């Protein structure tokens, strides 16, 4: 499993838990407001970086990291 999939599963699990309003607490709201946005930002930055690298590989043939 790739690191992107792990971050996505983690974020989806927290979001699914927060959709269950019977067990929703103030702590869950704080947790969602503080922790989920950085997870999404990190995930999207990894995905965008990989897209740019693949584009560069296709455009120039080889990409050196």
Image (spheres, rainbow, N blue to C red):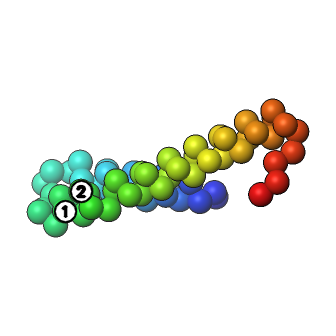
Q: Give the residue drawn at x 19%, y 62%.
A: 30
Residue at position x 12%, y 62% from top? 25
Q: Quadrant of the C terminus?
A: bottom right
Q: Is residue 56 left or right of residue 46?
A: right
Give the quadrant of residue 56: top right
Q: How far apart are marks 1 and 2 (CA)?
A: 5 Å
Of residue 23 and residue 31, the one placed in the foreground of this image is 31
Give the image location of residue 58, x and y in percent.
81, 34
Is there any visible trace of residue 1 in the rendered image? Answer: yes
Considering only vertical position in the picture, is 4 above or below 52? below
Q: How many labels does the image show?
A: 2
| Left or right: 38 in relation to 58 | left
Q: Are marks 1 and 2 in contact (CB under 8 Å)?
A: yes
Check disc 1 and report its element: helix, strand or loop.
helix
Quadrant of the image containing the N terminus: bottom right
- Residue 30 has which mark? 1
Task: Identify the residue position indicated by label 2 in the image.
Answer: 33
Closer to the camera in the image, 56 or 34: 56
Q: Where residue 64 is drawn, which disc sits there? A: none
């Amino acid at each position: 499993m790739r690191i992107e999939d792990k971050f996505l599963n983690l974020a989806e699990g927290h979001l699914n838990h927060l959709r269950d309003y019977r067990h929703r607490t103030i702590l869950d709201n704080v947790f969602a407001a503080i922790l989920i946005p950085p997870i999404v930002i990190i995930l999207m930055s990894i995905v965008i970086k990989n897209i740019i690298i693949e584009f560069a590989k296709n455009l120039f043939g080889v990409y050196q990291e």
